[in-house]
Amino acid sequence: MGALVPKLCRMSSPEAAQPAEHPWGRVAEDGTVFLRTADGERQIGQWPGGDPAEAIALYAKRFDGLEIEVELLEKRLAGGTLGPDDAERAIKTVREQVDGAAALGDLDGLLARLDALAPALDKLRAERKAARETKLAEALAEKTRIVETAEKLAAGSDWRNGADKLRALLDEWKALARLDRKTDDELWHRFSAARTTYTRQRKTHFADVHADRERAKTVKEKLIVEAEALASSTDWGPTTTKYRDLMARWKAAGSAPRNVEDALWKRFRGAQDVFFSARDAANAAEDEEFRANAVVKEQLLAEAEKLLPITDLDAARKAMADIAGRWEAAGKVPRDRIKDLEGRLRAVESAIRAASEKEWKRTDPEKSARADDLVSKLEKAIADLEADLAAATSAGDAKKVKDIEENLASRRSFLDMALKAAADFGG
């Protein structure tokens, strides 16, 4: 009832007649205002010469204000909007306002309601403590992870991304709760040491890289001088080999500083382009010149392929020997025709060789002498060609070297066939 009476008083208008009596007090004839408590009446004020109803309304209104403070405190504590310490201070403040207050109402009831907040305050403290312990445990786990991650970075060689990762880890660290001083300081020391180690090693690495790139720059500048000196050469074969060697040395030199690498490469590649463009133009002109030779060899192939299938081995061999001589005399063909033309000729030679082997196996051993004679002649011819090849190689005559090598390949092919025949006769 103590909570209802003041509210009923608040519902009356200021002009309405107020009784001199109140459920929680009264106004004496001399204007003294009394509050009724469990321990008896307590004087709370004076209202001399005034309307007693106005006095009761004033002191009842004061109680209403105190009750509102208690209600607000209860709601804030229940809603969790106050921390334990703030709540304890607020309860103490309101209690001081209620205890001994000059107000008409159930002040003891308000004090009892404040006392009833103690379990809620204890619960709030326990929840906040548990939450803080959970937060600290999570912070410990996260800081330990951050430290271990930083130490792995310090032990590694991720120089490109490691610094950014460490900065991100530092931001994570700053956002976490501080642990007890000893634990926090130990973890921070490890984290800081890992960052320092990584930074020092990273600086050393990039200093070494810079030195290596400066050395590479010096090497590549020298290679460019060599490449530019060869650019006007018309000694196509040997110069091509030299450029291959220069390219291998260029790659082995490593990267120069980024601000000069592209410019160095353009100069180096430019010198090569001059040479290879001139070589390709010369080869194209040479290929054009050799197209007539290809026509001749196509005609010779037509003759050779007519020998198949072989019906007269001796005639086929004689015809093939004649074709081989004219083939060599016809000269070179364009590069894009060599494989095709040579392949077709080798096919006819293989067919004749196979027929010869078959014939030799069934012929009389007296013919072995002819095989031996052929072997001797072919061996002498090959020896002479090898001598010519050595001389051409020493002279640096790439064209002659290639011609002799092609001739040698054909002679050795026939020699293989002759040796097999001689071996068969000897067996």
Image: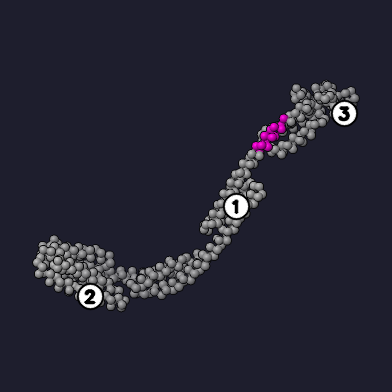
Quarter location, residue 352:
bottom left
Q: Is residue 414 visible?
A: no
What's the magenta bit mostly, secondary-structure-wise? helix
Callout 2: few (<14), some (14-19), or many (20+) C-alpha neighbours within 10 Å?
Answer: few
Rendered-image quadrant of the N terminus: top right
Three-letter amino acid code of the residue under disc 2: Ala
- Towards the viewer: 14 or 99: 99
Q: Secondary structure at mark 1?
A: helix
Disc 2 designates what residue?
383
Disc 3 designates what residue?
46
Q: Position of residue 113 (x, y in %)?
A: 73, 29
Disc 1 designates what residue?
170
In this picture, is 411 found above or below 173? below
Q: Which residues are magenta?
A: 116-128
Task: Say left or right for 331 vs 118.
Answer: left
Q: Secondary structure at mark 3?
A: strand
